[in-house]
Amino acid sequence: MTVTVPSAPMHHRLATAQSAPALRWGVIGAGYIADVFARSVNGHTQSRVQSIASRDSHRSNLYAKKHGVDTVRSGDGAYERLVEDPQVDAVYIATPHGLHRDHALLAIAAGKPVLVEKAFTRNAAQAREVIDAARAARVFVMEAVWTRFLPHMVEARRLVSEGAIGEVVHVSADFGGSPEYDPQSRNFNPDLAGGALLDLGVYPINFIHDFLGAPASVRAIGALAPTGVDLRETVIMDYPERRSMGTALSTFEVDTARLASISGTRGRIDFGHDYYAPTGFTLTRDGRRSVEFSQHVELGWQYQVAEVARCVSAGAIESAVMPHSATLDVMAVMDEARRQLGVVFPGEDSPAT
């Protein structure tokens, strides 16, 4: 029997993104990711982007014009002026992940709820510093793992938790792209915490963690770029007590299929291309397709924006869907993978510092 799901019930949160409380967002960084964020916020929630800050005045002004942003901050002190603005309710950090720690701490010190683009920081030690600061200040902070809030992921978690595929035995996911090699770019520059793992590998590792949690051990193999950052890796996450395993592949060498699968003792869930973005899945049991889930969703970042608004309105300092512990677990996996690969960023004695 095949069931196609044409629209989402309320627990998928498709219907609730627009009904979440409104926030006035300040955005730090005016690149591609910040552009998608603004389109998701302004077009699919009650919230709006109120202020943009970039040290590049040309980029910040273009961003403001494109998205109808009222306040532009640029030049020295731009980020400080944004977080101190009383017209800004929450801050989204869209700078390269090597800078996330400093910018997150800036927002927290100003008492502003903050959504930090992934990877959350360059290592677990920095992640703990940010989370500890947020907890001490009673300020909401969340890593922007938008995938966890998408309708197909909400439904897949429900099916797995209800035993639809039995005990989970193996979870696999890949994400490969082929950016042009530029040693000064954020992808390959060690000063900016470059490398495939923190840029792309954070997706498959988060996907595995979503269904299996923190692993007992991590094994990584791969290769490095000429700048010393990781070019490609396969990370195996082992769960011996559950008799389960996760396999995550990420690379800057080739465009991979970008697929994911959850295999259990009674069946399997296969996700469509770009599993980390709005897509669908097929549940197979006894060799037959039993459920197909598909749903058209524009952009998709509106769900994490709605989650922040709901949490802030409720006085929460973390999300139950993307809690602080998940960020720390995933950062620890990536630290260990970098340690095994021999990737150490400037200023680190090891990935853990």
Image (cartoon, rainbow, N blue to C red):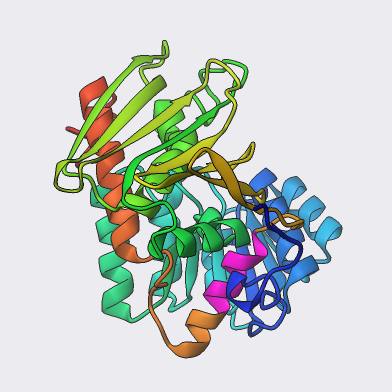
User: Where 235 sits versus 21, above or below?
Assistant: above
Which image quarter holds the C terminus? top left
Asked whether residue 282 is in view, the answer is no
Describe residue 222's horizontal placement relative to residue 90 as left or right.
left
Q: What percent of the width, then of the height, locates residue 53?
A: 63, 59
Residue nearest the observer in this picture, 217 or 193: 217
> Which image quarter: residue 347?
top left
Verify whether residue 211 appears in magenta. Answer: no
User: Where 241 sits versus 232, above or below?
Assistant: below
Describe residue 103's horizontal placement relative to residue 278 as left or right.
left
Residue nearest the observer in this picture, 196 or 221: 221
| Residue stretch rendered in magenta on the structure | 301-309
Measuring 35% from the left and 17% from the top, which residue is drawn there? 228
Asked whether residue 214 is in view, the answer is yes
Measuring 50% from the left and 58% from the top, which residue is drawn there? 148
Q: What percent of the width, then of the height, locates residue 127?
A: 30, 54
* Total marks in image: 0
Measuring 33% from the left and 81% from the top, which residue is drawn there? 138
Verify whether residue 305 appears in magenta. Answer: yes
Q: What percent of the width, then of the height, locates residue 169?
A: 31, 42
Residue most toward the top?
Answer: 226
Helix, strand or loop: magenta stretch: helix
User: Where 1 sits versus 217, above or below?
Assistant: below
Q: What percent of the width, then of the height, locates residue 145?
A: 49, 55
